Image (spheres, rainbow, N blue to C red):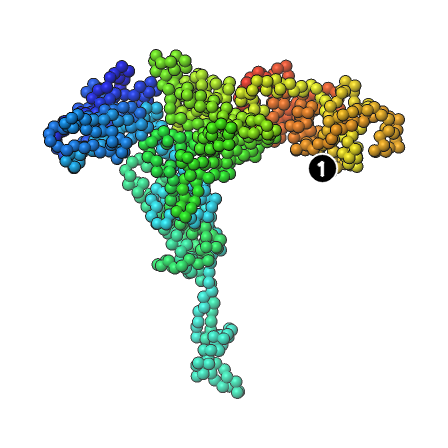
Amino acid sequence: MASPLIGYKDQELVYIETQKLDLIIKGKPYHPKAEALNKSQSNSSISVVCKESYNIDIAHSVKDFLGVSSVSKNKSIYRTIPLFYENQYYEFIIENKGEYEISFWHQNSSIRDRVNAVGRNKRTLSGILNFGSEIGFSEFIIMVDGESFLEICIEIFPSKIDYNDDYVAILNDVNNEIYNLSFDFLKKTYLWSSIRDNVGGSLTEFFSIIKIIFDKFIIASDTVIKSPHHVLQKENQIVPFHKLKKANSDTLKWLAKRPHNLLMINEDYIPIKALATKKSICFDTFENRFIKYTLKTVAKKLEGVKANYIKLGRKTDDNIIKQLDSMRHEINRRLEFSFLRGVGDLYTLNSLSLVLNMAAGYKDLYKYYLMLIKGLSLDGEIFKVSIKDLAVLYEYWCFIKLNSLLKSKYKLIKQDLIKVDNSGLFVTLSKGKKAAVTYENPQNGERFTISYNLPINVLPTVSQRPDNILSLKKHRSKIKYEYIFDAKYRINPALEGSSYREAYQSPGPEEDDINTMHRYRDAIVQDSIQGNEFERTMFGAYVLFPYKDTEEYKNHKFYESIDKVNIGGLPFLPSATKIVEELLEELIEDSPETAFERTVLPKGSYDYINSIDFTNRDVLIGALSKSEQLEVCLKNKFYHIPCSEIAKARLPLRYVALYQSSSKFKHNTGIYYYGEITLAERVKRSDITEIPSSRNIDILYYKFHVKEWKKLETSIKPKELRISSRLYTNMFLLLNSEYIPELCIKSKEEYRLYMELKRLSSSICVSVSDERQDDWSTNIVLEGSRVSVEDNMIKVYKGHRYYEYRLEDFASKPRAVISRIQRFLREE
């Protein structure tokens, strides 16, 4: 269609002429943002109902008027291009042609009150209306002398997203994810209070539920069939005495009442015939009748779903038909080929027995029956908010979609988005209330939480409440890494001639929203560990905004800023989730070092980080020769080692740590204690009186006096490397290593690479040539392949194949390089 020129002025969009009044709606038949963002909108509709005949003109200057679509019961529907948009002003004018009392009505009072009589004679009603971010149909009624005279319904389109694609997809995402979370909640609970009180859930809802629980429904049925509840049934029969196998109290009572059946023979009474009682197992119980009723009811409902689906008259999905037939077949097979075939029908529902409440199989079938018959009762503000309120809906959708992306890759541990009370399930997601969902990374067991509307009140200045916060706690790290994903239903279209276009060239988030992200990161702080100063807790902040051209946006300054300062904007719509999904994965998979380096640090922080000298191995890891030595060293605050074991080039040493071998300490193997060296003495072995020895008394030893022994927060385990005498490392590695081979890492780059690869596989290790040498070499071994850092390159060897990556690329985008290494290692 031909796009109206940006310079178009307001015009008559709709003009309706009747004998009693004229209605004029003026405005622009386009929206500048919609034009700039090239939204492919579908046709619009305007419906009119009038008690009298009328003439109508619709947007004469727009050539795309499509004419009358249908007329029925005085209601005419006109098809045209979109004429009305969110957040745009329209003038409504109603001219009274006689002495009538005319009033304007709309269900929204804020809109209704804006159209009022003007002029001294009050014959004209006029008002400027703006529908805000409300989307969809909006109906107006013009009252004449207190009765409805003219009804007009217009369609309001969004300006930032596609109405029939993105808008519908957002609604579907919200609906589907809420129900998926509800079903997940129900599967983990017993469901009693999560069932509606009234019977009669829709067939659609019935099918949605049974698709999820059908396998468990069948398993519960098979459990009942294998071990059915039964009763012993007595059957009395009069038989000749010679056929009576066993007499009981009932037999004697029967004979006592019928002495004529007794004959006296040789002074003994012999019965002619007697009562025989036979016991048999009976499955025709109330509980089994109920189970049969349940299976038949579900099968009948499945048949009803199929019949109604076919009646829709549209192209049917063969997979759905097959699924329905398969379910019905499975149920009917159990009805026809099991003990249930001989069970009677259920006509009345008695009070429920303990069997249905407690017996294996029975209680589950009863639970699923309630679910299927009564359905779900979902409540909460998210369903009360008008679906037209697109700004609020987009905010809800962002949180729900973030969770949907996370749930597809990580294990859902806990959520308080769906809760239960006596009225049923309800959704806690609402403005002004917080909600949180916790996940676990199956690769490393780390847990993380995404929170909605979490208030942060304990701040030195002003409290903050971002929309969504991703909070990560990584192994070996004492701090939480938090990131803000703030939903903003705003976008600057970068119109020609605007300052935004000149600065950024293409559409993107508003500048003040980016400034808000800076404010969040700077304002949200917590007390430091020392307690006398504050530290930032937010390592990144991102604006989520509605835009779908992700490839174009990758050249935007506010996308590139994420790599530079970890603040920027991310396009997020149902058709554009890839960028957000990739960033989420990076943040979750990042090592603590990469997460730390993503943020902008105060001046001087990089100097501190880069000041770690991996070549300065001033920490001695010394082995203990016997278990008793540990107690003596700890008590007397020293450690001794032959001078021949330590080269002079290694001196001076600042710290010493104690290695406990498996041969001497069994289960307490590894490094547990370290201390700062205050004095290093060269003494004869005979002078070390704390641990007397009769051998080698003239051999020179170093006796290192320790200020105090400290215990590592987490002991360092041997893994592939065991220390026979001594090993050298630095303090950073001592405090941050999990296994002893990690103490041999020789550079910051090698350490960063190892920590990133370690998060991918538990089979990773550091291969050391010989720790007893003063100049050993190291390699990283991962899934049978060798990785090393040489000549500013990362070199990966897999069998006879070889590949290398630049350290410079790894330093700037570690996750991207790690992903490339992963792909290379997985190649056959």
Residue 608 location, quadrant: top right
Rendering coords of residue 710 (x, y %): 71, 32
191 over 756 or under it: above or below: below
Q: Residue at x 79, y 22 (%)?
A: 646
Rendering coords of residue 692 (x, y %): 86, 33
Rendering coords of residue 204 (x, y %): 34, 42
Q: Residue furthest front?
A: 120
* In the image: residue 742, left or right of residue 310: right
Q: Residue at x 49, y 75 (%)?
A: 249
Under tag 1, what secondary structure?
loop
565 over 672 or under it: above or below: above
Residue 535 location, quadrant: top right
* In the image: residue 130, left or right of residue 622: left
Q: Quadrant of the C terminus?
A: top right
Three-letter residue code for mark 1: Asn
Q: Residue at x 29, y 30 (%)?
A: 136
Residue 714 location, quadrant: top right
Q: Residue furthest bottom?
A: 267
Rendering coords of residue 653 (x, y %): 75, 22
Residue receiving disc 1: 668
State whether residue 383 appears in this view: yes
